[in-house]
Image (cartoon, rainbow, N blue to C red):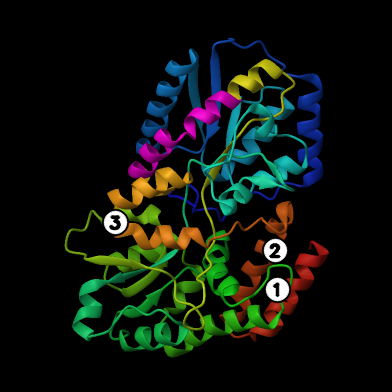
Amino acid sequence: MSKRFNRRSHRAVIPLAAVSALTAGAALTGCGQQRDHSVYTVLNSSTDETYHRWDAQAMTRCGRELGVTVEQQSVPAAQVMTKALRMASSKSLPDIVQFDASEMPTFAEAGGLVDLGKLGLGTRDVPQGIVDFGSYKGTYYGAARSVNTLALFYNKDVLGRAGLKVPTTWAELRDTAKRLTHGRTYGLALSAGGAEDGVFQFTPFMWSNGGDETRLDGPRVVAALDYWKALLKDGSLSKATVGWTQADVNDQFMAGNAAMMINGPWQVETLNTKKSLHWGIARIPVPRAGEKSVGPLGGAVLTVPRTGDEHRERTAGRIVACLSSEREQLTYARNSWMVPANEKAAAVWRRQVPELDALADQVATARSRTARLGAGWSGVSLALQSAFQSALTGQSSRTALQHAQQRATSGN
């Protein structure tokens, strides 16, 4: 969930039937327009100038290596799926689409993607969790160049002056946050907004506590939401947290209005612009000492749409292989502060950016949001978003999550 994938509050929910009809039509009829056989297009969300430039440079290197020209067409992250669908309906699908990994299963379930394994892409040096991140029902459809997750960022100076250690358990986090709350400064900032940002930030608390997205009203999920409510009751969280995005959380941390925050590596570039801010990073605290901190894998995957032109699909697969190679992953990760998906590249990355070593540890235990529910995740996400708004403004966690489970089950 990089800088380009963390603002998703207005992402459209596309009915699977619509996706199926459009992708099937595109595949059956093939490409509807004549294409330059040496020019390949990548649809992505690299609208930021820096990301667009980094991607352009990588595509130029891979294009030169493969003897083709690779061009990118960039739209805001919230528009990638709808743009891909419009292109499918006009039979002008790009050769490669970079989907947010949480959206990829919807396109895959509709039969719109090519199995990367059949195009020659292997996963030997990719951790199983990241393979699952790019897979749907056991088929590998999406190659990740880098991944990210959430971690606990803390102000070293503030904790040092208070004589406090970095918390590692929920009890320690609650106590530390309470001690660091005074005046205009809150002990902790996190996103509990009614959008995917809030759901992304809730998953480490739900999963680390043994909760499961297949049963939102289960006792472990209720306890996780009760923990958020306790932080709010303590005054350690701002009441405005119910409306904050992850970018808002970072703004609060940088302004000195929060001593700690839950956030991701896409904020590092911005954090480093404030030289007086001495920050550190650690794993997200767990319910009990010695347990695993399980966060969400975020980021995007490179996919090859099924267009019916097998020659172009094979070449597109070679481009994806190049863009996700160990060399390119390391370059991309160094630029973006993400963690390389390839284990060998990640080992080199750890040595080059030791200040983010805790993030790599968090990635090692992280999991995909869609691993269990596939395309059904979007319904669960919407249900949880509503539950946060209700529970954090007065309703009991159990009642809010019971309604969420009913909504997720019924699809309404």
Distance from disc 3 to disc 2, alpha carbons, whole Å, reads 36 Å
The residue carrying pointer 3 sits among few (fewer than 14), some (14 to 19) or many (20 or more) residues within 10 Å by Cα, namely few
Q: In this picture, which residue range is highlighted in magenta?
A: 317-335
The residue carrying pointer 1 sits among few (fewer than 14), some (14 to 19) or many (20 or more) residues within 10 Å by Cα, namely many
Q: Which residue is mark 2?
A: 380
Q: Residue at x 66, y 46 (%)?
A: 135
The residue carrying pointer 2 sits among few (fewer than 14), some (14 to 19) or many (20 or more) residues within 10 Å by Cα, namely many
Pick the front one: 376 or 384: 376
Looking at the image, residue 385 lies above or below residue 66: below
Name the kind of residue labelled 3 in the image. Pro
Pick the front one: 350 or 225: 350
Name the kind of residue labelled 1 in the image. Leu
Q: Which residue is mark 3?
A: 354
Q: Residue at x 49, y 54 (%)?
A: 6
Q: Is residue 119 left or right of residue 171?
A: right
Label 3 or label 1, whichever comes before in sequence order: 1
Q: Quadrant of residue 186?
A: bottom left
Residue 240's x, y, as percent?
Answer: 45, 74
Looking at the rendered structure, the secondary structure element under dot 2 is helix
Q: Are marks 1 and 2 in contact (CB under 8 Å)?
A: yes
Label 1 or label 2, whichever comes before in sequence order: 1
Looking at the rendered structure, the secondary structure element under dot 1 is loop
Q: Are marks 3 and 2 in contact (CB under 8 Å)?
A: no
Distance from disc 1 to disc 2, alpha carbons, whole Å, reads 8 Å
Membership of 85 in magenta stretch: no
Looking at the image, residue 69 lies above or below residue 270: above
